[in-house]
Image (cartoon, helix red, strand yellow):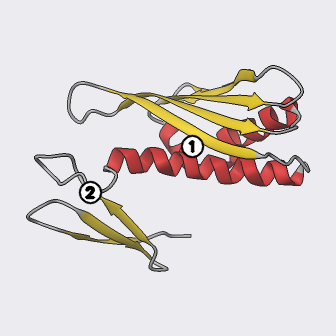
C-alpha cells in the first residue's frame, strides 16, 4: 500500500496547499515572519493527525463494544526541543469522553489504539515518548482520569 500527497508551495509566503490522491485538501502555513499564520503549521498538523488517527480507532472500538459516548474530544499537547530542528520531546494525548461508559472499555479501546492500531502513534513512538490518558465524565459519579499507556522508543508500557 502506498500513499502520496502533492503539495503546491507559495514561494513568496511559504503557505502549502496539499492534496491527497483523492483530492482532499490539507493546508499548512508558518508563523510570521516565515508565513501568514493562515493555517496549522506542519507540527500542529502532525499532532492533529495523531488525534484523528487514535480518535477514529477508539470510537470504532467503543461502537463494537456497544459503548455510546455522549461526547468525545481529544486534547494533544507536546513539548519541543529548544534547538533546531525543534523536534517533539514528549507528547500527551488525553481522550475526553462523557456518558455512561464502562471505564474498562474506554481504557482497553485506548490501549488497543495506542499499542496496536494507530499508525501515526506507532511512527511517532519510534522517536518520542507519548502518554495516553483518558478523562471520563459520567452522570452517575465523579470523573475518572487515568493513564492508560506510555509508548516510545523504549517500547510500550500498559498501565
Direction front: furthest residue? 139
Q: Position of residue 102 (x, y in %)?
A: 89, 34
Say what secondary structure mark 2 lies in.
loop
Q: Nearer the viewer, residue 9 or 112?
A: 9
At x 57%, y 52%, the residue is 52
Say what secondary structure mark 1 lies in.
helix
Q: Which residue is mark 2?
A: 38
Please report whichever mark, 1 or 2, sits nearer to the chain's N-terminal start: 2
- The correct choice, above or below, for 4 with respect to 40 in the image is below
At x 51%, y 70%, the residue is 2
Q: How many marks?
A: 2
Quadrant location of residue 137?
top right
Quadrant location of residue 114?
top right
Q: Which residue is mark 1?
A: 122
CA neighbours of label 2 inside 10 A, class few (<14), some (14 to 19), many (20+): few
- The correct choice, above or below, for 142 with respect to 101 in the image is above
Marks 1/2: CA distance? 29 Å
**Quadrant showing the N terminus:** bottom right
* Residue 84 circle label: none
CA neighbours of label 1 inside 10 A, class few (<14), some (14 to 19), many (20+): some
Answer with left or right where residue 158 lies relative to residue 122. Answer: right
- The correct choice, above or below, for 44 with respect to 7 in the image is above
Does the rendering let one see residue 154?
yes
At x 43%, y 48%, the residue is 46
Amino acid at each position: 500500500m502506498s500513499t502520496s500527497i502533492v503539495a503546491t508551495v507559495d514561494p513568496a509566503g511559504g503557505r502549502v496547499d496539499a492534496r491527497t490522491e483523492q483530492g482532499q485538501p490539507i493546508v499548512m502555513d508558518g508563523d510570521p515572519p516565515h508565513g501568514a499564520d493562515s493555517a496549522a503549521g506542519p507540527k500542529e498538523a502532525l499532532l492533529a493527525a495523531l488525534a484523528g488517527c487514535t480518535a477514529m480507532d477508539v470510537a470504532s472500538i467503543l461502537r463494537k463494544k456497544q459503548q455510546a459516548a455522549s461526547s468525545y474530544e481529544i486534547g494533544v499537547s507536546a513539548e519541543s526541543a529548544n534547538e533546531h530542528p525543534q523536534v517533539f520531546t514528549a507528547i500527551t494525548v488525553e481522550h475526553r469522553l462523557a456518558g455512561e461508559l464502562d471505564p474498562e472499555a474506554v481504557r482497553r479501546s485506548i490501549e488497543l489504539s495506542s499499542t496496536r492500531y494507530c499508525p501515526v502513534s506507532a511512527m511517532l513512538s519510534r522517536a518520542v515518548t507519548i502518554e495516553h490518558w483518558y478523562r471520563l465524565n459520567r452522570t452517575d459519579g465523579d470523573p475518572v482520569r487515568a493513564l492508560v499507556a506510555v509508548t516510545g522508543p523504549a517500547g510500550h508500557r500498559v498501565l
